[in-house]
Every structure is written in structure tokens, then in C-alpha cells.
């Protein structure tokens, strides 16, 4: 399974070009649409990042694709916008 993450501090975002391409492929219309609600394992998002490479990076972003085994329950963890994929587990405090 492939997952898109931000590999640098600052936070996940798509460039204007990547946003337009994603919207084109998904059929999303309307001004004001942004990438905040996009599933990071969305095949269209992965295609856009693979197609555009560094041109997909939004402001302060450095997008990359992480591959994990199928069937793993995962979540995105982050520190100051820099992200990594972690296997879900239970925690208590």
C-alpha cells in the first residue's frame, strides 16, 4: 500500500498545479476546494504525486510516498508538520 506524507517541517500541502490535476482526475469542482480532507492513500493523490514529483509540493511541503504492507492498520504521525507512517496500536494514559 502506498501513502503520501510530508517529509519536511511545515505541513502537508499540494501545489496549485497538483491541486488542479487532482481536481481534474477526481472531477472535483468549485473554488475553495483544498487538499485537507484527502485520504493519503487515495490512488489519485498517489498518481498526482508520482506524476508531478517535486512540482506537487505545496508551500513548505516535501511530499513523498511510503510503501507499507497491505493489511496493516496505519496512521500518520507528525511533529511540526514533518510526517511518518506508524502502525496503529492502543495507548492509555
Image (cartoon, rainbow, N blue to C red):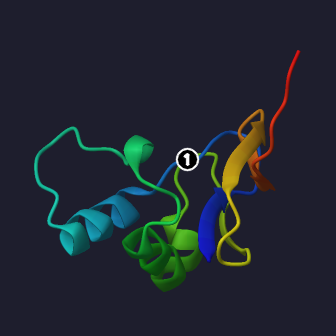
Judging depth in this view, the residue of 79 and 90 nearest the camera is: 90
In the picture provided, is 71 more to the left or to the right than 16?
Answer: right
Residue 39 position within the rendered picture, expressed as x and y whole percent measured from the top left: 45, 55
For numbered disc 1, what is the local secondary structure?
loop
Q: Position of residue 93 (x, y in %)?
A: 88, 15
Residue 59 point in image, percent of width and height: 55, 47
Task: Please tell me which residue is depicted at 73% across the width and 74% down the height of the picture.
Answer: 68
Nearer to the camera, 58 or 47: 47
In the rendered image, the quadrant that contains the N terminus is bottom right
On screen, residue 5 above or below 67: above
Q: Is residue 6 above or below residue 77?
A: below
Asked whether, in this view, residue 47 is left or right of residue 63, the answer is left
Which of the 4 quarters of the picture holds residue 81? top right
Q: Residue 90: percent from the left, percent from the top?
A: 81, 36
**Quarter holding residue 42:** bottom left
Specify few, some or many for label 1: CA neighbours under 10 Å numbering under 14, 14-19, or 20 or more: few
Residue matched to label 1: 59
Amino acid at each position: 500500500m502506498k501513502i503520501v506524507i510530508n517529509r519536511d517541517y511545515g505541513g502537508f500541502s499540494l501545489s496549485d498545479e497538483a491541486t488542479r490535476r487532482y481536481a481534474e482526475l477526481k472531477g472535483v469542482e468549485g473554488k475553495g476546494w483544498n487538499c485537507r480532507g484527502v485520504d493519503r492513500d487515495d490512488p489519485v493523490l498517489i498518481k498526482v504525486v508520482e506524476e508531478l514529483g517535486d512540482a506537487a509540493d505545496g508551500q513548505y511541503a516535501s511530499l513523498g510516498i511510503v510503501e507499507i504492507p497491505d493489511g496493516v492498520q496505519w496512521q500518520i504521525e507528525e511533529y511540526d508538520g514533518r510526517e511518518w507512517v506508524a502502525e496503529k496500536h492502543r495507548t492509555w494514559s
